[in-house]
Amino acid sequence: MKKQRQTDLDCRINRARLAGAYSGYTEAEFKNYLSSIGLNVYEKQILPYETAGEYPSREPAQGIKIIPFPGVLA
């Protein structure tokens, strides 16, 4: 089963490589490229939430101005 999944993943990667602008890359180069994209997304979007605890901070970021709305109490 694991070998079959790996083969399916390799087929998907190869199909994407050949269909896109990186068709000149070898399979290994394209896999490294995909890994770097995935790592960048993970570091910028997922990791901050994972390291901030269960939920992101509820405190406003510095420099953000909170605009009060009429009739809404904080």
Image: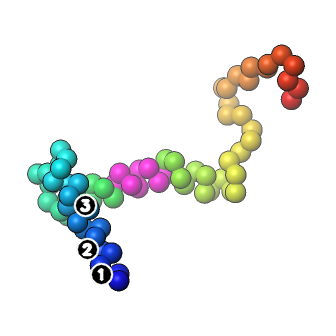
Depth order, front residue of 64/15: 15
Q: Are marks 1 and 2 in contact (CB under 8 Å)?
A: yes
Residue at 79% from the left image edge and 20% from the top image edge:
68
Mark toward the start of the polypeptide (2 vs 3): 2
Badge 2, how many Cα within 10 Å: few under 14, some, many 20+?
few
Q: Determine the CA span between mark 1 and mark 2.
A: 6 Å
Coloring scheme used: rainbow
Residue corresponding to mark 1: 3
Percent across and percent down for residue 57 are: 71, 45
Q: Quadrant of residue 67?
A: top right
The amino acid on which the numbered mark 1 sits, given as a three-letter code, is Lys
> In what element is the residue under mark 2?
helix
Residue 44, numbered label: none
Which residue, as the protein is rendered here, is positioned at the far left? 24
Amino acid type of the residue that numbered disc 2 sits on in the rendered structure? Thr
Label 3 SS: helix
Residue under label 2? 7
Q: As drawn, is 9 to the left or to the right of 41?
A: left
Q: Which residue is mark 3?
A: 13
- What is the distance, in whole Å, between disc 2 and disc 3 at their CAs? 10 Å
- Residue 38 included in the magenta stretch of the image: yes
Mark 1 near mark 3, Cβ–Cβ under 8 Å? no
Classify 15 as above or below 5.
above
Q: What residue appears at the point 74 percent right and 23 percent down from the top-left corner?
A: 66
**In the picture, residue 7 is in which quadrant?**
bottom left
Quadrant of the image occupied by residue 18: bottom left
The magenta region covers: 36-43
> Would residue 9 be counted in the magenta stretch?
no
